[in-house]
Image (tube, rainbow, N blue to C red):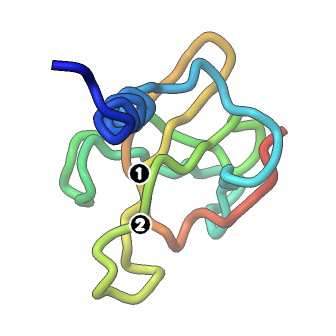
Amino acid sequence: MKPTVLTAGIVMWAAAAWAVPASATSGPGCLRVVNVESWDTLNVRARPSASSRIVDELPPRGHGIISLRGECVPRSRPWASRWCPITHYNGDYTSRGWVKARYVRDAECP
């Protein structure tokens, strides 16, 4: 059976959806840490829950690049109460996890 244009498009979309960028690029789509004291860190959690395991810590300054991976959830909650999926790039180290929306703001990617 010969693939149709629609089938080829779905396959390309699925491949793109699963692709993980090697590094962040310039432009919008990044975040910066806010509402965290200079001596403290923002915990990155394995799951969108304060009781979930900590997978990384982001200082308010010098945290590398924080890239938003998707929509902050749940949409039914006020913005500050939502959890945002992120990827943190810091040199050769990359981590993925969740942060509370009240502690991050939009920023330009370097």
Residue located at (34% from left, 41% from top): 6
Q: How many marks?
A: 2
Callout 1–callout 2 Cβ contact below 8 Å: yes
Report the front residue among 15 and 97: 15
Residue 15 found in image quarter:
top left
Q: Position of residue 61 (x, y in %)?
A: 76, 45
Residue located at (63% from left, 69% from top): 35
**Kind of residue indicated by mark 1:** Pro
What is the quadrant of the N terminus in the image? top left
| SS for callout 1 | strand
Q: Dot 1: within a 10 Å radius of its alpha carbon, few (fewer than 14), some, or many (20 or more) residues? A: many
Residue 44 found in image quarter:
top left
Q: Is residue 54 left or right of residue 62?
A: left
Residue carrying label 2: 72
Q: Is residue 85 left or right of residue 62?
A: left
Q: Position of residue 23 (x, y in %)?
A: 65, 23
Residue located at (27% from left, 25% from top): 3
Q: Is residue 101 left or right of residue 78?
A: right
In the image, residue 45 above or below residue 56: below
Residue that protrudes farthest toward the left in the picture: 1
In the image, residue 4 above or below residue 58: above
Q: Dot 2: within a 10 Å radius of its alpha carbon, few (fewer than 14), some, or many (20 or more) residues? A: many
Report the front residue among 63 and 21: 21
Residue carrying label 1: 85
- Say if residue 38 shows up in the picture: yes
**Kind of residue indicated by mark 2:** Cys
Report the front residue among 2 and 74: 2
What is the quadrant of the C terminus in the image? top right
